[in-house]
Image (cartoon, coloured by chain):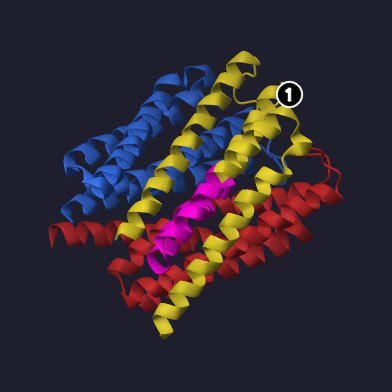
Chain colours: A red, B yellow, C blue
């Protein structure tokens, strides 16, 4: 169960990071004078909105996968992948806001962390069922 | 475990509410004659689409957070926050459809419920691991 | 617990399918020369982006619902609904890319699987609490 608690802490940190991105998107909307329901018209808002949306897309994979992964594999492995995800998202946000075409490395860090987490979850569950 | 069952029921209700929003967005697309893959061109559709998208953004935080929170804290606290989330979303939808600039209070209810749920989850997991 | 393992495997497969959709959206962005933060300007990219977004919307319901459903109901029922969801998404992707107006059946398969999963989850949790 210690396993799971590491993963739960990393899930909570990733969700708090996302909550900050949501707050930053709201602030960019006000500052850029983008009236709802529009989601375009100001470059800084559009970049921040894309950071928030892309993080949402990755979180839908990350949250269940890290919890399942941590149930089947050693706690340290889940922790390393979770920390890579969170640092990857920070890097993605900072680089995207500066220059969208520099977003590659931050995206790759989260994408590959997620790929390992979800493939590991699948392998763990199949192993547990057949083993 | 009774704790968890309250939270599970509130998760299910929030997801059914979201399923209704998805259905309303589809209906608004047909009525407003917005042909896929476009997501603009009709004011009512754009508002409903934004309500649905914003609810998606908040649900990604809400669903794992309320389940983790309910595991570490009293059932009634999780229930109050979950009910605030669901009422906040209803208010958000109704006010956004009437006038997007009136969406603040409904948004704030879900944002702050989520903030308490996720910070409480983090505190609970840290406490459990170190305590 | 065997129940849960079937559902966990289907969750992992659905998330891997989504990861493939995310990869296809990235490839369509490069091929269609749609520069970030834009999300329009190329028909094929827009279709693939909508497939990915719609799948995200449905996964937020699917992932928690199938896990809760599998906890309260027979494993085979959860498996049938999970397989219907994954096939429905594949059909949705293929038909949307060919012709967006043919996306109905694939969408319906996932929407109704999700509706049964979430209503079944609610019924199961209420039954467990009161029973």
**Magenta part of the protein: which range?**
B57-86
Residue beneath disc 1? B43
Please tell me whether residue A102 is drawn above or below residue C72 in the rendered image: below
- Percent position of residue C75, x then y: 18, 44
Majority secondary structure of magenta residues: helix
> Quadrant of residue A120 in the image?
bottom left
Asked whether A128 or B104 is in front, the reply is: B104
Report the quarter where the N terminus of chain B lies. bottom left
Report the quarter where the C terminus of chain B lies. bottom left
- Percent position of residue B125, x then y: 44, 74
Asked whether C121 or B84 is in front, the reply is: B84
Please tell me whether residue C22 is drawn above or below residue B2 in the rendered image: above
- Residue B98 visible within the image: yes
Please tell me whether residue C107 is drawn above or below residue B88 in the rendered image: above
- Percent position of residue A130, x then y: 13, 58
Mark 1 surroundings: few (<14), some (14-19) or many (≥20) residues within 10 A = some
- Percent position of residue C50, x then y: 56, 33
């Amino acid at each position: 169960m210690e396993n799971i608690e590491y993963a739960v802490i990393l899930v909570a940190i990733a969700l708090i990071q996302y909550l900050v991105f949501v707050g930053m998107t709201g602030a960019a909307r006000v500052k850029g004078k983008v009236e709802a329901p529009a989601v375009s018209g100001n470059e800084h808002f559009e970049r921040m909105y894309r950071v928030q949306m892309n993080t949402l897309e990755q979180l839908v994979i990350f949250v269940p996968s890290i919890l399942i992964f941590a149930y089947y594999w050693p706690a340290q492995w889940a922790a390393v992948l979770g920390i890579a995800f969170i640092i990857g998202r920070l890097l993605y946000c900072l680089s995207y806001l500066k220059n969208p075409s520099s977003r590659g490395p931050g995206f790759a860090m989260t994408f590959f962390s997620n790929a390992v987490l979800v493939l590991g979850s699948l392998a763990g569950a199949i192993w547990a069922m057949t083993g």
